[in-house]
Image (spheres, rainbow, N blue to C red):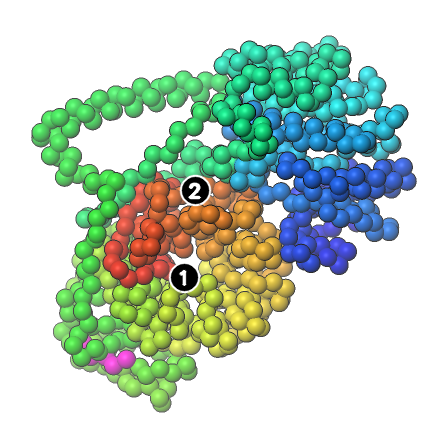
Amino acid sequence: MPLEPGNLLQNRYRILEVLGHGGMGSIYHAVDEVLQVEVAIKENLFASPEYAEQFRQEARLLATLRHPNLPRVTDYFVIEGQGQYLIMDYIPGIDLKDRIDREGALPLHEVLTIAMALCEALEHLHGQQPPIIHRDVKPANVRITPEGQVYLVDFGLAKLGGADQRTLTGAQAVTPGFSSPEQYGTSGHTDARSDLYSLAATLYMALTGVTPEDAFERLMGTHSLTPIRELRPEVPPQLAAIIEQALALQREERPPSVRVFKEQLLALNLLPNQEALAQEHRWLLQPSTAQWRTSEEGNSSPEPDAFPPNGKTLAPQAQPSTQPQMPKRRGKGRLVLSGLLVLTALLILAVGALAHPVLRAQLDQAVPALGTVEALPQAQAPLATAQMWLYGLPWQPTTAPLPVVSPTASPAPPSPTLAAALRATASPTFTTTAPPTLSPTATPTALPSPTPSATAVLVTQFTLTPVAQPTPFGQSGAIAFASTRSGLAQIWLYDIANQTFRPLTNEPDGACQPAWSPDGQRLAFITPCTRNQVRYENARIMLLDLQSGTMEVLVPPSQGDYDPAWSPDGNFLAFTSLRDGHPQIYLYNLKTQSLTNLSQNAYDDFMPAWSPDGAQLAFISTRQGVYRIYLMPPSGQPQQGFSRSGNKRNLHPTWSPDGVYLLYSQTPSQGIPMLVSAPLAEQGLVEHSLNPALGIAMADPAYSPDGRWLAVEGWQGAEAHDLYLLSSNGQTLRQITADEALDFDPAWRPKPTP
């Protein structure tokens, strides 16, 4: 019976997802709950006694293998009436077939690097006693990690080379284009030269982007092998000849072993520093290449809005050039050439414009300077001397009050004639009160006291004069964030158009983690908070109503509640809680005031983030030893792994407004945090870096409502953490705070609705 995500196998291996199906069983991605590591599980449901015995023998031998380009086999067991199971290392990353399907032919040096790694893996297999013949070498079984390590995986068809060299019944299978003629049963038994044929076919596809003609069809005379240089003329003739010789239909015409084949490739001396690499046996792709961060896939976002005046931008720094990749389709080269000609013409025009004094002056006025870091003016207005508050909205006579953003005409900011508000005393039992009706006079109106322990709150009346306003930046021109600029961390609001800052909280123990309700009228946050952390002991989630100015405890307090996240319909709040002694994700029904533990005490889970349609929650979990991203529905089950980032630490997941991408911050084992965008459709196998400027660490991204911009926390070295605006395609970066304070937890305000 097939296993399903969530099943526990052998009281140890928790199934996370199905990686693939075959005629003899499936391959699963699972976590070893004893050692807390990821594993791959190979299943054999073939009930033949002969094949079951061969599977057992292979498991024992494979368990002895230790090679940097082969996954380890760590366990083997039989469940009577169900099947046999082989437990192997789980290799994160992407397979070579998927990459070729997306990018076409690969750069020459990458193909040769992959060839060296696979040759050494096969040499190790063929050198065992008895030899192990893989028999299923193909691009889909070549796995490349985000760090650039190449692995040959899937021993499902492996054969032990005994004295009679026969294959036991049940293990026969072929892959058209990659299986040797002898695997079709046309020319005797398989041996090491059969693997060599499949390796050459794999390299053929990597060089050309095309699957070679099938061996059986070539034997029948219906097809012949297309020469490599006919598909890709720039491939060196000697390299093409070596690979084509290994694709000979007769085994005797191929190189006698993988070792000889590897020596032939090395003799071409096409790889830099290949002697040192061969001595160290370290054939690695560049990490930037291995993570598939192609500019074509990463820059599909629409052009962002123009920056507001007096902005500061950072131009993306040039990345080291790499060998150009072969296109998937012929004719694309003409488009590239045309583009270069157009670019050259534009450069000529630009130089001419810069040389002309009048045009140069117009350009200086129209285009902001790029590549410089300038401090923005801090338009923060001081609080009134009496420190009078409408809770969260201090009286600031020289600064416009909280704007009401709208894409159409809306009233102008009111002109205050009187303001008096006393901050309510701290109480965990505040209730939300309705805002008073505005009148054209300036008569103070007392709001109902939320509890007997709270003092009266006065609200000023204003005269409103309607004027037209432009569409707000990012569709909503306000960003809430946490900052230590006033001492303790508090929630502040940044008005992008006016470049003004105003505090929203004045909590005696600090406040952070602002989270807007979908209507943009209420703000959840946590207190106490003294600094940016992953875990907040004894924190409670509060709710600030920006219309009435009232505040209340939103979730019944516990040992610590934090990471608030509103559901898109505003009816639920997902959050992290320590009420069970360790981080768990809870769901709070705002209508029924009921709590549900979605994590069910299985693992440490935190940082929930709703998908735009409310159908899924992304969250962080330590169930695999490092911080990884998982997905689950609001019911809590099933839970499925998403990120496959090796030993990198992932935090702060957020969804693009269209639900197509998951964006998160990622920290490698050695390096600074960066932003990573992963398409949902690729299930975490593809990641794109969005850091446009080298040396600037970035974390905690928040999308603008229109999806064109990101508000992020950024810093350089030991400098203070500031807020930046980053276009969602990663091409434009602008710093919006520049002081010695720590600014973090940005939350872009949704377009307010009544």
- Mark 1 lies on residue: 518
In the visual, does 80 lie left or right of 510? right
- Check disc 2 and report its element: helix, strand or loop: strand
* Residue name at image x 87 percent, y 31 percent: 168
- The image's mark for residue 199 is none
Give the residue furthest to the right: 49
Magenta stretch holds residue 441: no
Cα distance, mark 2 to mark 1? 28 Å
Q: Amino acid at mark 1?
A: Pro
Q: As rendered, which of 184 and 122 lies closer to the eye? A: 122
Would residue 326 be visible to someone looking at this image? yes
* Residue 586 visible, this orientation: no
Residue positioned 50% across, 52% down in the render: 649
Q: Quadrant of residue 447?
A: bottom left
Residue 496 vertical position relative to residue 320 in the rendered view, above or below: below
How would you rate the neighbour count of disc 2 (Cα within 10 Å): few for under 14, some for 14-19, many for 20 or more? many
| For discs 2 and 1, the disc positioned in front in the rendered view | 2
Badge 2 vs badge 1, beta-carbon distance below 8 Å: no
Counting residues from the N terminus, which is met first, the one under dot 2 or under dot 1?
Answer: 1
Q: How many marks?
A: 2
Residue 712, x across and y down, in percent: 36, 53
Q: Secondary structure at mark 1?
A: loop
Q: Residue furthest left?
A: 358
Which residue has dot 2 on it? 689
Q: Residue 632's x, y, as percent? A: 58, 57
- Could you tell me what secondary structure mostly forms the magenta stretch? loop
In the image, residue 484 lies at what x, y percent? 30, 66
For badge 2, the amino acid type reads: Ser
Residue 349 x %, y %: 20, 23
Magenta segment, which residues?
A: 419-423
